[in-house]
Image (cartoon, helix red, strand yellow):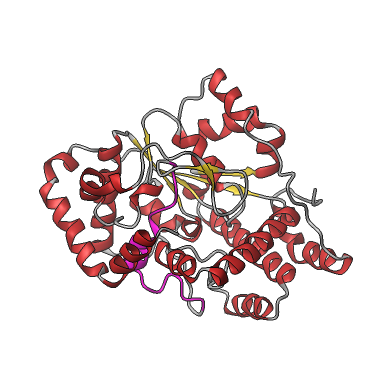
Amino acid sequence: MPAWLDRLGAFVERTSGFWRWLGELESRLFADELAAVPIDRPIYVAGLARAGTTILLELLAASPGVATHRYRDFPLVFAPIFWNRAFAHVYRSDAPPTERAHRDRILVTPDSPEAMEEPIWMHFFPHLHDPQRCNVLDRRTAHPAFERFYRDHIRKILLIRGGQRYLSKGNYNLVRFGYLAKLFPDARFLVPVRDPRWHVASLIKQHRLFCAEEERDPRILAHMRRAGHFEFGQDLRPIHVGDQTAAAEIRERLARGELVAAFARYWALLYGFLLDQLAADADLAARTLLVTYEELCDRPQATLERVFAHVELPLPPTTRDAYAARLSRPTYYAPRFTPEEQRELLAATATVRARLGMAEAA
């Protein structure tokens, strides 16, 4: 955690109202340029953390004409034109790739694509990470000030990146698909889904890693909060989908250290919520593709073709094969549950696994 990033991030957090104002000023100053930028079929990648959202983001972001947030856009996310044209050089343009903090084989630089929308959502919707309240935004949601700011923000990312299609990775958007579908009737949604045994094992690995790192350096915890990352670590906040009883049980099990049971129930709750939403909304279902992580790794060519066809991006055979060569199941960890933990995990996820066609955990 560079000291300058910690100090600047803290300043932006304390003065978020000013940065919103600056973003609105930016929109007025560049109004003519932004008006000429259409928002065409934006692409949203979302899922429970550790499902494969980052690798999908990276593969899609490499397509010509696709524009997305990058690491270098933080912390002045509210005014990306000013920041990128005047100050983004504070990040080295020749920085060598390094493994990201997750220690999961993914190498990043300041120009790597990343989830950066969340500070904007948090500013306009302060309750979105309140574990005691429903965090869902659906077709009934309306917030004109946010919607103006957000549409302009997307146009700004397209403008500064010279893109035609906006791509967003944001795991919390999983419970905002209804709202996003209303805002953008031509949006496409991708949801990676992972076998719950491996998924829960990965969540526990990351949770323990970030808890230890945040204990070692409290600035990491502060950064995670400012960036809107509450998926694991000391300030883990499970998404509340409206089921108060289930949310309370997950929080209680986390507090008792029953991580396998807690994350298994969380997996079932989120993907069950998504399936219910798709079953009740035919339009949203038609625009949403579920991508099984295991199929992406085991049958990458065919799975990539389905993904790129769904979002209407070209995928030449040579590109497809190059992407496929990057994909493989992890070998640096494996699920290690007691027999009782495994029985509880399979029982907690059985109904949703069956709905997803995962009758047997692989």
Tell me the quadrant of the picture where the N terminus can be found.
Answer: bottom left
Q: How many marks?
A: 0
Residue at left offset 18%, top offset 63%: 21
Residue 134 position within the rendered picture, expressed as x and y whole percent measured from the top left: 48, 73
Relative height, residue 349 to residue 83 (above, below): below
Tell me, yes or no, whether the highlighted magenta stretch contains residue 187. Answer: no
Residue 64 position within the rendered picture, expressed as x and y whole percent measured from the top left: 40, 28
Relative height, residue 309 to residue 186 (above, below): above
Residue 188 position within the rendered picture, expressed as x and y whole percent measured from the top left: 45, 42
Q: Main secondary structure of the magenta part?
A: loop
Query: In terms of depth relative to the viewer, which is nearer, 257 or 139?
Result: 257
Q: Which residues are magenta?
A: 112-131
Residue 10 position within the rendered picture, expressed as x and y whole percent measured from the top left: 33, 68
Can the viewer see residue 238 in this picture? no
Residue at left offset 13%, top offset 46%: 31
Can the viewer see residue 328 in this picture? yes
Residue at left offset 61%, top offset 53%: 50
Q: Quadrant of residue 106?
A: top right
Q: Quadrant of residue 165?
A: top left
Residue at left offset 46%, top offset 55%: 177
Query: In terms of depth relative to the viewer, which is nearer, 230 or 224?
Result: 224
Judged from this view, the residue extending furthest toward the front is 3
Relative height, residue 327 to residue 276 (above, below): above
In the image, 13: left or right of 168? left
Tell me, yes or no, whether the highlighted magenta stretch contains residue 119. Answer: yes
